Image: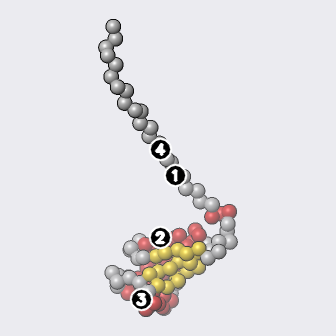
């Protein structure tokens, strides 16, 4: 004879959600983004200017002007570009932990 049956515990279902990211920027080449540098109290002015020169490929006087604008106004638009270039610029600025945001224009 079979042993007395024990209560059956409910079966737990585990749902696994996979997120997939697709880069669809090539489908909308007309979209442009602003790259915004926010004021920074942690880095020297020289560090910020040098990083701006690296990110933008701009001369020192332009980098200083953008850095001073961010310092005085709290933020500065440092570039307007398509998504891939805007992301590259932001990534270079973030290499030294500068605070940067992107804003889609259209």
* Quadrant (top left, top right, bottom left, bottom right) of the C terminus: bottom right
Q: Which of marks 4 and 1 is in front?
A: 4
The image shows residue 10 at horizontal and vertical percentages of 40, 32
User: Could you tell me if the residues under marks 1 and 3 are in contact, i.e. CB atoms within 8 Å?
Assistant: no
Residue 12 at x, y percent in the picture: 41, 36
Q: In this figure, which residue is indicated by the disc labeled 2?
A: 91
- Residues at circles 3 and 2 in contact by the CB criterion of under 8 Å: no
Q: Mark 3 points at which residue?
A: 71
Secondary structure under tag 2 reads: helix
- Could you tell me if residue 42 is visible in this image? yes
Q: In which quarter of the image is the N terminus?
A: top left
Residue at horizontal 42 percent and vertical 89 percent from the top: 71
Nearer-the-camera pick, 86 or 33: 33
Estimate the spatial distance between the alpha carbons at disc 3 and disc 4, rounded to whole Å: 46 Å
Nearest the eye: 73 or 1:
1
Which residue position is annotated with label 1?
A: 19
Distance between mark 3 and mark 2 Cα atoms = 20 Å
């Amino acid at each position: 004879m079979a042993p007395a049956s024990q209560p059956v515990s409910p079966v737990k279902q585990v749902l696994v959600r996979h997120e997939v990211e697709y880069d669809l920027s090539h489908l909308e080449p007309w979209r442009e983004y602003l790259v915004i540098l926010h004021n920074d109290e942690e880095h020297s002015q020289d560090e910020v200017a040098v990083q701006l020169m690296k990110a933008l490929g701009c001369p020192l006087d332009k980098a200083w002007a953008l850095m001073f604008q961010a310092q005085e106004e709290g933020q500065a638009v440092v570039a307007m570009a398509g998504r891939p270039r805007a992301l590259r610029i932001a990534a270079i600025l973030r290499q030294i932990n500068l605070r940067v945001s992107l804003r889609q224009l259209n």
